[in-house]
Amino acid sequence: MDLLDQILPLVQKPARYTGGEWNIVRKDWDKVDIKVAFAFPDVYEVGMSHLGLQILYHIVNSRTDALMERVFAPWLDMEEKMREHNLPLFTLESFRPVRDFDVVAFTLQYEMCYSNVLNMLDLAGIPIKSNLRGEEHPLVIAGGPCAFNPEPLADFIDLFVIGEGEEAIGDFLDFLRNAKNRNLAKKDLLREAARVPGVYVPSLYRVEYREDGEISKVEPVLKGVPEIVKKRVVRDMDKVSFPTRPVVPSTEIVHDRIMIEVLRGCARGCRFCQAGMIYRPVREKKPATVLRQAAGLVRQTGYDEISLTSLSTSDYTPVRSVINALIKEHAGCGVSISLPSLRVDNFSMELAKEVQKVRRSSITLAPEAGTQRLRDVINKGVTEEDLMSATEVAFREGWQAVKLYFMIGLPTETNEDLDGIIHLAREALARGRKAGARRGRLRVTVSVSSFVPKPHTPFQWEPQASMAVLKERQAYLAAGLRERGLVFNYHDTAVSFMEAVFARGDRRLGAVLENAFQLGCKFDGWSENFHYERWLEAFRQAGLEPGWYAYRRYDYDSLLPWDHIGTGLSKQYLIREHQRAMAGKTTEDCRTGACTGCGLCSGLEVEPVYAGGERDVQLPDAIQ
């Protein structure tokens, strides 16, 4: 601590490294069997905004035989001081070196954090490659959405936990305690761990390639190791453990509010959306559970805002009654409600009007594509009239600014679709003027990201548009969106390209990652720290061509790097959805239409769970 005290005055935002927050859990190191360091490969403000961290922190620390402490990626200035003074990466609860823990558990939320994973291991004094780690080193594990294609990190992670962690972490810790009591060598421990449901041990699988570079075979090297690792699923969201005493940061973070997950999963079926595919089926919490958790969180945190989180909160069947109950119970104390994820429909606007009675938040709508044709291709299920009526209501109700999210580079996109984005933005601005929004404050922000083909989606076989094409389309939009009141934001095409490379990558990319780490790549998701030339050099050194991964169109019969990871969705369903997309045909939500035959209910023996409520009646109109 003396050394840390000397360093902290020399770095930005020292509160990132001091710990000691409200509701922090400190345990007697000598009285627990298993010590886990939860490693978030980004800065404190981003990591502490992640609900999954709070959930797992609560679950592990609820056990008497285990503890979990937190560690985040130190910012560049802090890393420089740590290396200069030989201060190893440490956790915020005990300030112990991460290498002293039994397990280092990374969450993988975004492909561009992979270089930080390697950097954090190195800063901890742990060999970055798993085959160089001995019995004295912690077990390095990883989970999160990117674990659904774990192959680019196969050289560095001892085992992955696939799917939802609430129950899987308990099973894994039980297994680990047993293995520790038996003094199992790491090699034997990994062999036995591979039999725990949801656990993938990459070193126990052999990958073979054809001369053209395609994968020809992925198979276990040992008997008893599963050919397909199925994801873990929480069946009952009301019974699963949820933290009502979360750690409250002592400095401002990205999402600085109470977060309550009201449902998990989404059956809308947007064909580009990985989260909508891998988190199926829909499982809702009962209103009583949400209200009880909200009351506890308000009491235990002091926050003045409750955010009802999910992939699409307006789909939560009892959403209106729950919002009304929350406002009735907490508004008198100045606690507001927010809905961070709203669809482009009238019902969503009605909800927005309800929640802004206490405090007005911003309105963000995501039509994703500029024309109805392309919205049908991606199965977005909203119309131009939905968007226009939503923006009109927003401006009429007093909002001065609306944000619209779109994606470019989507399969089958043409200039007509770009013109559609320009038209929608200008029309939204016109509706704002007509509704009487104050001149000078009226603003429509158009944010455009680039399509990245993600594993386990109907668009997984599609190539990404080239950087040159994406830049042309960005310039086209920039020219068309020049008007007072319109703001245009877009993503760096080189970052999106590299994201696509690693999203679709295989385990040969491990060499690239190691090269990139050696070349100094880190915080690649932060535009000011992304060095495209370094990444190209890393590929050159590995003898690989990044465009081969991002720009290739896969055949349906191609063996994909992630085919041995099971989401429960059948490949036939994804192929069928891809073919319907190319034909411009939409597919109904299984909650309101026929079963789509995705295969999940039968494949994982788990079915959707609905809490029931007035939203059931209105749902068909909203997604026509």
Image: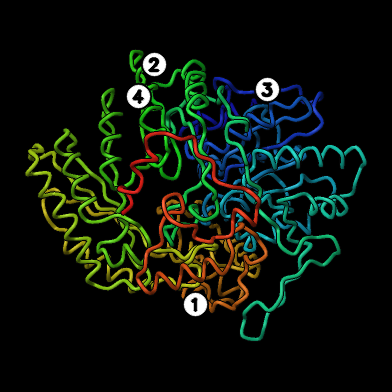
Q: Which residue bears the numbered disc 4?
A: 324
Q: Classify 247 as above or below 194.
A: above
| Mark 1 → mark 2, Cα distance in angstroms | 54 Å
Badge 3 crowding class, 10 Å Cα cut-off, few under 14, some 14 to 19, many 20 or more, is some
Q: Earlier in the sequence, mark 3 or mark 4?
A: 3
Q: Which residue bears the numbered disc 3?
A: 26
| Mark 3 → mark 4, Cα distance in angstroms | 37 Å
Residue 335 coordinates in the image, percent (x, y): 36, 20
**Kind of residue indicated by mark 3:** Arg
**Kind of residue indicated by mark 1:** Arg
Q: Classify 333 as above or below 307.
A: above
Residue 305 coordinates in the image, percent (x, y): 38, 25
Q: Classify 206 as above or below 18.
A: below
- Inspect this view and state whether residue 432 appears: yes
Q: Earlier in the sequence, mark 4 or mark 2?
A: 4
- Residue under the point 41% across and 62% down: 587
Q: Which residue bears the numbered disc 1?
A: 552
Q: Which of marks 3 and 1 is nearer the N terminus?
A: 3
SS class of the residue under badge 3? loop
**Kind of residue indicated by mark 4:** Asn
The N terminus is located in which quarter? Answer: top right
Which numbered marker is on residue 329?
2
| Mark 4 → mark 2, Cα distance in angstroms | 9 Å
Instruction: Determine whether label 3 and label 4 are within 8 Å by CB.
Output: no
